[in-house]
Structures are given as structure tokens and as C-alpha cells.
């Protein structure tokens, strides 16, 4: 008779599951701890499949697993998954940063900022090195003035009215009287001629455009003769050149031609008068008021000082200067015809021309104005030709024009005697520098003696310029770099200046450190 199977075998064969004490009936039984069979393992994800990651749970095995209490079921599998090994994860992924120190902070910032600073420094150096250099400039470092020794001269001034004597480009030698506005008569025609030549400039040998004589100019001649007004014969329809018209107003002082020029230039006499006053303001003639183009009206007023300002500007025009130094000219508008053979000679009212070096410029007289003369004379001094410009106004001693002329002559001769030449700068004397614009300078010296013209007590202003050619960045010692000048206008003298040492470009350090 065979052996009957034990109880456990029966249970297994019948499909029933025997529960071990302390386990849930629903859980499958695993091998006993210490059993010979392989341990089973269970995969526990580090994060739930449907939620945020959770740390894995280390499940106790073998004898380490505590037995659940008899009356308490074992924890569920999900509960074990929600308790991660925090100590292990903290060591692996969440280790706290070491405590901060000043040295560590400095090192970290250096690692961040050093490359950026280096890049910026490279850009700065490159830009500074490649920037265009400033243009070198000449600077006067020595004396800027030269003063002649001695007391100012006493000139033979008139006993009334006003008088002024200037040396063109050098300054005023002296003046006399109260410079209050007074009538100036035909001296006003200097502004008329100046404006016409400014608006319609001529070359020295050029006659210029023809001007058609209108009825008004003929009527002014016809009416002016019995009135003993200064006029030149003209007839309607005649053609008179611009140059002859200016000769007519500056030598025989033709009032009718002055008004004709005003209409030709500006369209009307009133518009031309506006231009006269505008020009006077531009020249700083603050005490001058023009009310007509000829000066016949006594409401046209000025001063000797203001008219000398105008004369200095007008005499800079070679055509004006050539006309006013003429003793006479041949008119083409007289009744005898318009050919040279029948022309009528018109004399200059300034009887000083061409005596005593006088080269102009204009007389003027009326009953109220008295006698007036605006004059210019040349004087050669030390190989230079100086221009004496002055005025004597408001002379009422008869004959008024002769009185003004006599005082003008005395002033011209006395002023010429006071002019002398002295050496203001010696050859080789350092007079300035070339400034490279970045802090560097190279000395420059006079290439010859500078002789200046003046009179006792006069001060001559010195200056330096590059003659409009610019200053190079590099040049050898001895290179001519410009001129040292004294005075202005016809009184200007100049000597070359040269480098006293090699001129070099600014250093790299100077280029790097420039701020402007």
C-alpha cells in the first residue's frame, strides 16, 4: 500500500496556497531567508511613473527585516517607495557648497572679469593707435610784442576840428579833437566808390561795363553848373565806363555821376544809401550816417576816425588805389565828343597828389562842413614802403580846402620823419614751437633778422603762421615751417622760421594716453 502524500503536498497539488504566519494571504511567498534558492529582487524606480521623482527605498532583506506586529499588516509597497535614502542622495547630488571666503570670491570674480577686461583693453589700444593724429600747430613762445623806446611824438595838429594819423597795419600815431559826427561833404564819395568796386570789381587795366547816362544825370549837370556844384558834363544816352565814372567822382568830385552810379548799382539812390550805412556798420564806423551818395547833404555826417577806417579798407583795392593817385583823367563825355582827341582833362581836387608821396584820396567841403581832406601817402623806411593814412576835418579858415590841405601836408611830413626801423628778432633766436597736439613740442627759430618799422612809443604785434601750407608730422631740423610776422597790411614784415630740432610723430605712449 503506497505512502500517502503529506499535508503540504496536498495543499500545493490542490491549488491552495498555505499562508505563513505574519504574511498577507494575497502576497506570494518568497524563499525563506537563508534558503538555497536565488533571492528574488524587485525594481523600484527612483521616481513614480506618474509623478515627480522619488528617492529609491532600500528594502531590508534576510534577518534584517523586522517582523510585523501580529495585529498590524505590513506596510504597502508604495509607502516603501516614498521613503528615499536621503543620506545617500545628499552625498551624491546635493552636497552643500563649501563655506564662502574673501579669497574664493576674488578668484571667482577674476575668472569672470579678466577675459572681458582684456578684450576691452585690446580694443582701446587698437583704437587709440589707429586714430588720426591731430594737426600740428605753430605757437609763439617768445615775446608777442616789440615796443620802440622813447616818448610818443608831438605832431603839428590843426587848431580846430578833428585830425587822425595812422600807419597802415601798424596802428595809430596820434589824433586830435573831439570825434563827434560832423558833415564831411564829398568825402562821402569814398564809400560810393568802395561799394561800386566791391559789387562790380575791376582788374587793374580794365574799364569795366558801360553805364548809360540817364536824364536825371544830365539834369543834375545842367542845374549844378549855376549852383556851383561839383559836376561833370554828361548827356542822356551817352555811355560811360565804370572806371571813368569812378574817376569822375574821386578826382573832380562829380555829384551827378555819384548819383548815377548809385542808381546803376542798387536800382535807386535810396536803396544805395541803405547799402552805404550797412557797409559803415560792418566796418565799425559807429559815428557815421549817410543820407546821400554824393555828400552834398549836410545830414551826411562822420568823423575823421571813422573815415580813416574806410580809407584803409578802400586803399587795399588796387583799382581804387590806382585811380585816387591820378593827378587827372581824360573825360569822354564832354560836348567835344567821346574820342581821345576831343576829350577834356579833369583834374584831381586833391592838390597834394602826387607831391610828398601822396597817393590820394578825397577832398570834401560845404559851408557847414568847412574843409575836409582824407589823405594817404607812401614813405619808404628800411627797404619797406609804409602807407600813412589820415584825415583833417572841420577846417573853417578860408580858403577851407587850402587850410585842410596845408595841415594834412604838415602831418604827412612829420609822421614820415618819425618812422624808423629796428631789429625786433635776431637770426637763430627761438621764437616758438611746433605743438603736436599730444603734449610734444619742437622748437622753431627765426631764419633771419626781423626788422620792424615803428615810431617812439609804438608797439608792434608779432605773430607766427604756417603760410597756409599746414605743418607736417615729421621733418628734419632746418626745415622751413612758416613765417614770423610783424604788423599787417602794407606795414607787414615777415621772416622765415625753421625747425631747431627734428620733428617726429608722437610716441605710442602719447597716442595711447590721449583723451581728446
Image (cartoon, rainbow, N blue to C red):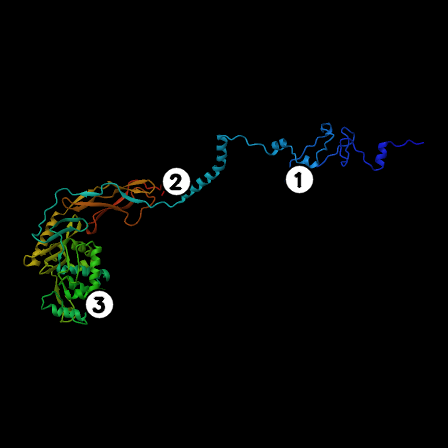
Q: Which residue lies furthest to the left in this view?
A: 398
Residues 203 and 104: in front is 104
Q: Residue furthest right?
A: 1
Foreground label between 3 and 1: 1
Residue 285 place in picture, x, y as percent = 18, 54
Circle number at residue 48: 1
From this viewpoint, is residue 208 visible? no
Residue occupying the point 9% across, 59% down = 368
User: Is residue 160 shown above or below 500?
Assistant: below
From this viewpoint, is residue 465 visible? yes
Q: What element carries label 1?
A: loop
Residue 455 place in picture, x, y as percent = 14, 46
Circle number at residue 210: 3
* Contact, mark 1 vs mark 2 (Cβ under 8 Å): no
Residue 211 is drawn in which quadrant? bottom left
Callout 3: 10 Å neighbours few (<14), some, many (20+)?
some
Image quarter (top left, top right, bottom left or bottom right) of the N terminus: top right
Q: Which residue lies furthest to the top in this view?
A: 63
User: Is residue 87 shown above or below 389?
Assistant: above
First-in-chain label (2 vs 3): 3
Label 1, label 2: how far apart the Cα atoms are: 65 Å
Residues 45 and 216: in front is 45
First-in-chain label (3 vs 1): 1
Label 2, label 3: how far apart the Cα atoms are: 65 Å
Foreground label between 2 and 3: 2
Residues 25 and 259: in front is 25
Judging by the rendered image, the residue that carries numbered circle 2 is 512
Q: Is mark 2 on a helix, strand or loop?
A: helix
Amino acid at each position: 500500500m503506497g505512502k500517502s502524500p503529506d499535508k503540504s503536498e496536498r495543499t500545493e497539488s490542490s491549488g491552495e496556497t498555505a499562508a505563513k504566519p505574519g504574511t498577507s494571504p494575497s502576497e506570494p511567498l518568497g524563499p525563506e531567508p537563508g534558503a538555497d534558492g536565488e533571492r528574488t529582487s524587485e525594481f523600484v524606480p527612483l521616481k513614480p511613473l506618474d509623478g515627480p521623482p522619488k528617492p529609491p527605498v532600500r528594502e531590508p532583506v534576510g534577518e534584517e527585516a523586522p517582523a510585523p506586529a501580529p495585529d498590524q499588516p505590513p506596510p504597502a509597497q508604495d509607502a516603501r517607495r516614498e521613503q528615499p535614502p536621503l543620506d545617500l542622495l545628499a552625498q551624491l547630488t546635493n552636497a552643500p557648497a563649501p563655506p564662502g571666503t574673501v579669497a574664493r570670491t576674488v578668484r571667482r570674480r577674476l575668472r569672470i572679469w579678466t577675459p572681458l577686461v582684456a578684450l576691452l583693453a585690446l580694443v582701446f589700444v587698437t583704437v587709440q593707435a589707429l586714430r588720426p593724429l591731430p594737426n600740428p600747430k605753430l605757437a609763439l613762445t617768445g615775446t608777442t610784442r616789440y615796443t620802440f623806446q622813447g616818448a610818443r611824438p608831438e605832431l603839428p595838429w590843426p587848431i580846430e576840428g578833428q585830425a587822425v594819423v595812422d600807419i597802415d597795419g601798424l596802428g595809430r600815431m596820434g589824433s586830435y579833437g573831439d570825434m563827434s559826427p560832423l558833415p564831411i561833404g564829398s568825402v562821402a564819395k569814398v564809400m560810393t566808390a568802395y561799394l561800386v568796386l566791391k559789387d562790380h570789381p575791376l582788374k587793374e587795366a580794365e574799364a569795366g561795363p558801360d553805364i548809360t547816362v540817364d536824364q536825371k544825370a544830365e539834369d543834375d549837370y545842367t542845374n549844378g553848373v549855376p549852383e556851383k556844384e561839383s559836376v561833370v558834363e554828361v548827356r542822356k544816352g551817352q555811355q560811360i565806363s565804370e572806371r571813368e565814372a569812378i574817376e569822375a567822382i574821386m578826382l573832380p568830385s562829380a555829384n551827378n555821376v555819384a548819383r548815377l552810379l548809385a542808381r546803376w548799382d542798387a536800382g535807386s539812390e535810396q536803396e544805395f544809401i541803405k547799402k552805404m550805412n550797412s557797409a559803415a556798420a560792418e566796418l565799425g564806423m559807429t559815428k557815421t550816417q549817410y543820407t546821400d551818395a554824393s555828400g552834398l547833404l549836410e545830414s551826411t555826417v562822420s568823423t575823421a576816425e571813422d573815415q580813416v577806417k574806410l580809407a584803409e579798407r578802400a586803399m587795399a583795392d588796387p583799382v581804387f588805389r590806382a585811380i585816387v593817385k591820378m593827378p587827372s583823367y581824360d573825360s569822354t563825355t564832354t560836348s567835344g565828343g567821346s574820342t581821345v582827341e576831343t576829350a577834356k582833362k579833369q583834374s584831381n581836387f586833391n592838390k597834394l597828389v602826387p607831391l610828398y608821396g601822396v597817393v590820394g584820396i578825397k577832398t570834401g567841403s560845404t559851408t557847414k562842413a568847412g574843409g575836409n581832406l582824407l589823405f594817404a601817402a607812401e614813405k619808404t623806411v628800411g627797404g619797406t614802403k609804409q602807407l600813412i593814412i589820415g584825415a583833417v576835418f572841420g577846417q573853417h579858415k578860408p580858403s577851407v580846402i587850402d587850410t585842410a590841405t596845408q595841415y594834412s601836408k604838415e602831418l604827412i611830413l612829420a609822421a614820415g620823419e618819425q618812422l624808423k626801423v629796428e631789429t625786433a628778432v635776431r637770426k637763430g633766436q627761438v621764437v616758438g614751437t611746433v605743438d603736436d597736439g599730444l603734449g610734444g613740442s619742437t622748437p622753431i627759430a627765426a631764419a633771419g633778422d626781423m626788422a620792424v618799422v615803428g615810431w617812439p612809443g609804438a608797439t608792434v604785434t608779432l605773430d607766427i603762421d604756417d603760410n597756409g601750407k599746414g605743418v607736417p608730422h615729421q621733418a628734419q631740423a632746418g626745415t622751413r615751417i612758416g613765417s614770423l610776422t610783424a604788423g599787417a597790411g602794407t606795414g607787414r614784415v615777415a621772416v622765415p622760421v625753421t625747425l631747431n630740432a627734428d620733428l617726429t610723430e608722437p610716441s605710442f605712449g602719447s597716442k595711447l594716453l590721449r583723451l581728446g
